[in-house]
Image (cartoon, rainbow, N blue to C red):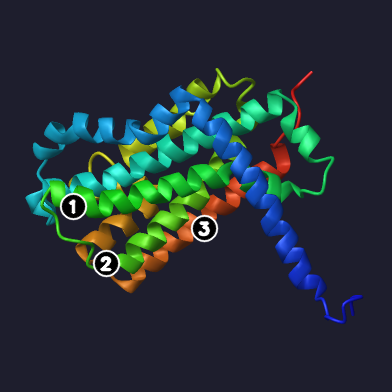
Amino acid sequence: MSATGIETRPGAAARTGTRDRLTALARAELTLLGRNKTTLFMALLMPLIMAFALHRAVAEMPLEKNGLSVGTALLPGTIGFVLIFAVYGTVTGALVTRREELVLKRLRCGELTDREILAGTALPTVLIGLAQCVLLVVCGGLALKVDLPRAPHLLLLGVLLGMVIVVAMAAASTAITKSAEAASLTTLPFVFVSMAGSGMVAPLGIFPDRVAAVLELLPLSPVMGLVRDGWLGEGDLTDTLKRLVIALAWAGLAVFAVRRWFRWEPRH
């Protein structure tokens, strides 16, 4: 009971404190993001540039055999580009920069928990990425004459799982990234593997069955499968559950890597 006679709940107060701390950290991170023109370019324009550059290549693929059009092949792929360029690359660079500037170390000396620090740093980028995905669904569909997603719950599930995976992967990638400049190199393997083998550029259905079965195990392959099924309204429960298991397994591995190898201050 407080002095004013109003009963306070510790749990509610803790949640309010967490929300306030996350909001403050996310606002500061958003301000820093707005000052970095290069990062803003990569986050906002790179996915669209990649989609435009690959339009002709996608149009020449045997899409009709797999029940796809240029739009239904390219739009899910562009959402994938948002995940790897706008979110994964940006969060990796932000965490490395804050670590090298000793910001993370100072934040740990305050009230923020480790999870709040990581979540607050990634939150603005994640929100920008989600906004881009919404615009792609609406405006991209109009531009490419594609209907709205027929199973939006699957598309939403795929995007949310993708955000979890790429943020966790970004935090894990900082363990092998010594500087902000090096982030552009250390993130390339995940970016290239995802673009080439996760169905962003070429849908897995055009590959031989044995090759496709292997590519389905890549981190973002289940995400792209859910997004594309959401757009087309296809996919059965077995396929959805299989993709959920693969995606959650990769998210779990990335979280384990963060717990094991994430560094809060520069290497000496």
Q: Which residue is mark 2?
A: 235
Please determine whether, in this image, residue 179 is positioned above or below residue 195: above
Secondary structure under badge 1? helix
Which residue corresponds to mark 3?
248
| Residue at image point 64% right, 21% down | 178
Q: x, y (%) of residue 98?
A: 67, 30
The answer to whether 180 appears left or right of 205 in the picture is right
* Distance between the alpha carbons at the discs numbered 3 and 2: 18 Å
Numbered disc 3: secondary structure: helix
How many neighbours does mark 3 have within 10 angstroms: few (below 14), some (14-19), or many (20 or more)? some
**Viewer-side residue, 191 vs 214:** 191
Residue at numbered disc 1? 141
Contact flag, marks 3 and 2 (Cβ < 8 Å): no
Q: Is residue 41 left or right of residue 65?
A: right
* The quarter of the displayed image where residue 9 is located: bottom right
Dots 1, 2 in contact, CB < 8 A: no
The residue sitting at 27% across, 35% down in the picture is 48
Identify the residue shown where x is 34% and y is 65%.
Answer: 154
- Place residue 67 in its image quadrant: bottom left
